[in-house]
Amino acid sequence: MIVEIGHYALVLALVLTLFQATFPLWGAIRRDAALVALGPYAAIAQFLLISVSFAALTYAYLVSDFSVSNVYENSHTLKPLIYKWSGVWGNHEGSMLLWVLILALFGAGVAVFSRNLPNDLLGATLAVQAMIAAAFLAFVLFASNPFLRLGPAPFEGRDLNPILQDPGLAIHPPLLYLGYVGYSIVFSFAAGALIVGRIDAAFARMLRPWNLVAWITLTLGIAMGSYWAYYELGWGGYWFWDPVENASLMPWLTGTALLHSAIVMEKREALKIWTILLAIITFSLSLLGTFLVRSGVLTSVHAFAVDPERGLFILIILIAFIGGSFTLFAFRARAMESGGLFAPVSREGALVLNNLFLAVAALAVLVGTLYPLALEGVTGQKISVGPPFFNLTIVPLMLPLFVAIPFGQRLAWKRGDLLGVAQRMVFAMGLSLLATLVVAYHIGRGPALAIIAIGLGIFILLASLDEIRERVMRGGTAGALHRLIGLPRTFLATALAHAGVGIMVIGIAFTAFEKEAIVSMKPGETVKLGEYSLTLRGIAPYSGPNYTSTVAHFVVHDGTRQVAELRPAKRVYIGRQMPTSEVGRHRVGFSEVYVAIGETSDGNHVDLRAYWKPFVTLIWIGPVLMALAGLLSLSDRRLRVGAPRVAARRPERLEPAE
Amino acid sequence: MSALSRRALVFGSLVLSGTAMAVQPGEQLKDAAQEARARKLSAELRCLVCQNQSIDDSDAELARDLRRLVRERISAGDSDSAIRQFLVARYGEFVLLRPPFSLSTALLWSLPAIALAGGIFAARSLFGRPAEAVATPESAPLAEAEKQALEALLARRDQA
C-alpha cells in the first residue's frame, strides 16, 4: 500500500509540474502577478509529493519488501541498515528518483527564497524548472519506474553490488547530484531571464547564491568520489579519466568558469552573453553526463542500439532542452550587447583568461569523451582515448591558469598593473622558491615537471594567504585583528579557494614521487617502502554480517619503531559471490602507507601491492577547502538575495567605477 | 547510482571473471629498468575487454596475457615502438590509449588548440569596444511598484 502511495504521488507530481510549467510562465509574460503567485505553491507541493514518493521507496528498502522488483534486485535482508538505506539510490531507478527529488528541492528553494526576486523572473524561472521536472518525472514513470511489483515475491533479494556497500556511497551520490542537478536552477534562471529580458547586473547577483550552492556540492561530490575510488577500488588511483568521471568534471569546469564570469557581469555589466551561455552550457553538460551514464552508450554504441529505450528518452530530453535554450539564446543575444570597457591586463582580463582556459579544458574533455563514440558511429573505426590523451591536453591548459591565479586576484578592475602586482608578491615568490628548493633537496632525483608543479602549488598557496596578510597588515599591526574580522567574506573566500587550488596542485604533483612495492610475502617477511617497512604477521579468515573475508595482518615500522598495524582484507560477499578488496592505510601527517592484498596462495603466501604516498591527502583537502570557501562566500551578507546594501566597505575595488 | 559507483560496477564485474590484482609479483621482470619500461608501456595499452582500463590496472585474464607479452618482447630486446606496432597489428589501434595522430584523429588532437586560438581571438573584441555601447537597450523602465520598493530600500539605507 505504501509503495502504491509513493507511485501515485509521483504521478500527481508529474501533473503538477505541467501546471507549474504553464501558468506562472503565462503570468510572467502577461505580467499577471496572480498567475505567477501560483508558481511557488506548485514548486513546494511538487517537492513534497516527490518526497513522499522517495520516502515510500526508502520504506520498501528498509523493510526489505521484495515484492518490489527494484528492492529485490538491489537489496538483501542481511545487509546492514545503512546500506539498505543508501541502496535506495545505489541503482538506476532509485538514483533517477533522487535526481527528480533534488530537481524539485531546488525549485522549492527558489520558491521559498523568492521574496526579493522580480515577479516575472520568478514565474519564468519556476516554469522552466517545472519543464525539466516534467521531462524527468515522465522518464522515471515510463522508462525507469522503481515501484514496479513482482509476483510472487521472492524470499531473498539479490543484494546491492558489494563495491557500493561502503559509507562513501551513502554520501557521494547525493552530493554529486546536488551539484549536477543544482545547475538546473542556474539554467532555469538563465532561461527565465532570457524569456522576460532581464539580463543585467542584478540578475548576476540573484544567480550567484544558486550557482554557489551547486558548485560547492559538485566540488565536494567529485572530491568525495575521487577519495572513495582511492580507498575502495584498491589500486590507489584518485582520477582515471573514465567517461563517467569526465561527465561530472565537464559541468564542474564550466560551472567554475560561470562563477568567475558572473562576477564580471555583476560588477561591470560585461560578459553578459557569455555568462548566460555558460549557465546554459553547464546544465547541458549535466544532462549530457546523465545521458552518457544512464544510456549505456559508453559500454559500446552497439549495446545502446540493442536496448535504446532509456537512452533515447534521455537523448530526446537532452536535445529538447539544449535546442530550446540555444534557440531562445539566439533570439535574445542581440539585445545583450553592452558592458564596461577594460584593458587586457585587469581583473576582468584575468577572469576572461580563467574562462578561456576552463572552457577549452571542458571542451577537450568533451571531445576526448565523445570522439571514440562519434568516430565509431561515422566510420566504424574503433579507437581508444584514454588517460594519456587527457594528461597531454588538460595539464598544459591548467598550468597557465594556475600561474595566473595569484596575479589575477590582485589586479585592479578596468586597468591593472602587472609589474606592481609582481612587486607586491616578491615576498611570496621568494618564500615559495625557497620552500621548493628545500623540497627538491629532500626528494633528491625526480621528474623536473613534478618539482615545478610542487613549486607552483606552493606559490599559489602562499600568494593567496599573503594577500590576506597584506590586507590585514595594511596600516600596521594595530587593529589587524579588527581588520581581519572586517574583511569582506567574498574576499576571504577568494583567497581561501585559491589556496585550496594550490594545496590540491601540491598533492597531485607529489604523486610522481610515490613508492610502490608489488610482492608476494610469507608471514614473517618484510618489505621496504621508502623510510617505512612492512612486515606480514599472519593471514586469517573472518566472517562479517553478509560477507566472508581473508585478512592479512601487517605491522608498519618507521626505522625500528612500530608505528601501526594494518589489516587489509579480501572480501567475498555472500549475496553475489563477488570479491572486493579492503585496503589498509596508515596516515603520517598528510601522507599515507597504503596496502592492498590480492590472492592468497597455499594459505601461506599473499600477493600484495603496497605504496608510500607522500602528501596524498592534500588532493582532497584542497577541494574541501575550496568548498568551504564557497560556503563562506555564500554567507556574505552582500550576496543574500536582495539584501539592502549598507555602504560598501571598499568601494575603490568592488564598485564599477562609472 | 553515481558516476563513480557506476565505474565501480564495471570494475566489479571484471573482478568476477578475472584474478585478483593488476600487476602481480610473479610477472615482474628481474631487470628494474626493463620492468619500469614495461610498466610505462602497459599504462598506455588498453585492456581490450575492459571499459577504459589499461592492462597495467586491469584484473582481466586478457590484461595479464598482454602484460606477459609486453614483458616477453622487452626481454627479447624489442623497442617500445616495435612492441606498440606489434600490438596494433594484432588488435588494431583500439589497443592504444593514446590515439596516434592520423587523418581520423586530427580533429581530436587539434580541436583544443583551435578552440584556444579562437577564444583568444574572440576575447580581443572585449578590449576594444567604443564607450557608447554601455547603454542597455533591453532594460525596461521601472514599474511603479518597483520604484516604490527602490525608494523604501534607499530610505532604509539612509537610516542605517
Image: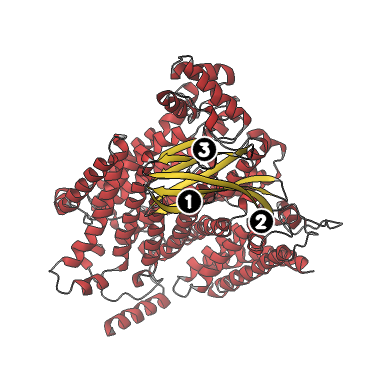
Q: Amino acid at mark 1?
A: Arg
Choose the circle earlier in sequence order: 1 or 2. Answer: 2
Choose the circle earlier in sequence order: 3 or 1. Answer: 3
Residue at image position (56%, 69%) is: A108
Q: Which mark is residue A367?
A: none
Q: Position of residue A204 (x, y in %)?
A: 39, 61
Residue for badge 3: A369
* Badge 2 density bin: few <14, some 14–19, many ≥20, Cα 10 Å: few
Q: Nearer the viewer, residue A503 or B77?
A: B77
Q: CA distance from mark 3 to mark 1?
A: 33 Å
Q: Position of residue A440 (x, y in %)?
A: 26, 41
Residue for badge 2: A544
* Dot 1: chain letter: A
Q: Do the residues at pointers 3 and 2 share their chain?
A: yes
Q: CA distance from mark 1 to mark 2?
A: 20 Å
Where, quadrant-wise, is the N terminus of chain A in this rendering?
bottom right
Residue A441 sits in quarter: top left
Q: CA distance from mark 3 to mark 2?
A: 40 Å
Q: Amino acid at mark 2?
A: Gly
Q: Is residue A176 left or right of residue B31?
A: right
Q: Is residue A364 left or right of residue B68?
A: left
Depicted A371 relative to depicted A287: above or below: above
Residue at image position (30%, 61%) is: A267
Q: Nearer the viewer, residue A279 or A226?
A: A226
Residue for badge 1: A585
Q: Are marks 1 and 2 in contact (CB under 8 Å)?
A: no
- Which structural element holds mark 3? helix
* Residue A156 appears in view: yes
Q: Do the residues at pointers 3 and 1 share their chain?
A: yes
Choose the circle earlier in sequence order: 3 or 2. Answer: 3
Q: Amino acid at mark 3?
A: Thr
